[in-house]
Amino acid sequence: MCLAIPAVVKKINRNIAEIESLGVLKKIDISLVPDVRKGDYVIVHAGFAIQVIDKEEALITEDYWKQYFTDEAGFEDNEEEYFEAGDNEDVQ
């Protein structure tokens, strides 16, 4: 299984693009998606754009990631309570 994030392409210089994802700017390799253009949305995994996607799909996926990070923040705030609710004493 791999995890990938949606991003919008901000700049392109040969096979390197500057992308923005969840408010973070990063440079990635776009050699796997040669037809990508500035303004396109891509799925990024391990520093590579692996697929061009439409804007609607990208925004929906971004919302899922935002929800995940929000849920994770809640987990950190209530970590002790979270583990007390479970019965798995083997996990440390």
Image: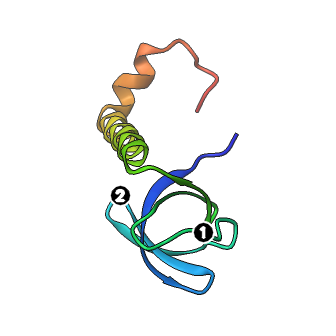
Q: Is residue 86 above or below residue 34?
A: above
Neighbour tally class for label 2: few under 14, some 14-19, many 20 plus, Cα within 10 Å: few
Q: Is residue 48 left or right of residue 76?
A: right
Task: From the top left corner, tell me how far across and down residue 26 is, in percent.
Answer: 46, 74
Q: Give the residue at mark 2.
A: 22
Which residue is at a point 53% across and 12% down the rendered structure image? 87
Q: Relative to the observer, which residue lies in front, 24 or 75?
A: 24
Neighbour tally class for label 1: few under 14, some 14-19, many 20 plus, Cα within 10 Å: few
Task: From the top left corner, tell me how far across and down residue 22 is, in percent.
Answer: 35, 58
Which residue is at a point 38% across and 51% down the rendered structure image? 55
Which residue is at a point 33% across and 37% down the rendered structure image? 67
Kind of residue indicated by mark 1: Asp
Task: From the top left corner, tell me how far across and down residue 90 is, in percent.
Answer: 64, 23
Which residue is at a point 38% across and 33% down the rendered structure image? 79
For residue 89, what is the image quadrant?
A: top right
Q: Which mark is residue 35?
A: 1
Which comes before the other along the chain, label 2 or label 1? Answer: 2
Kind of residue indicated by mark 2: Leu
Element under label 1? loop
Q: Is residue 77 above or below residue 49?
A: above
For residue 85, what is the image quadrant?
A: top left
Q: Which mark is residue 3?
A: none
Q: Does the residue at mark 2 contact the one at mark 1 (Cβ under 8 Å)?
A: no
Q: Quadrant of the C terminus?
A: top right
Q: Relative to the observer, which residue lies in front, 51 or 68?
A: 51
For residue 81, what is the image quadrant?
A: top left
Q: Quadrant of the N terminus?
A: top right
How is the rendered protein coloured?
rainbow
Q: Relative to the observer, which residue lies in front, 23 or 30?
A: 30
| C-alpha gap between disc 2 and disc 1 | 23 Å
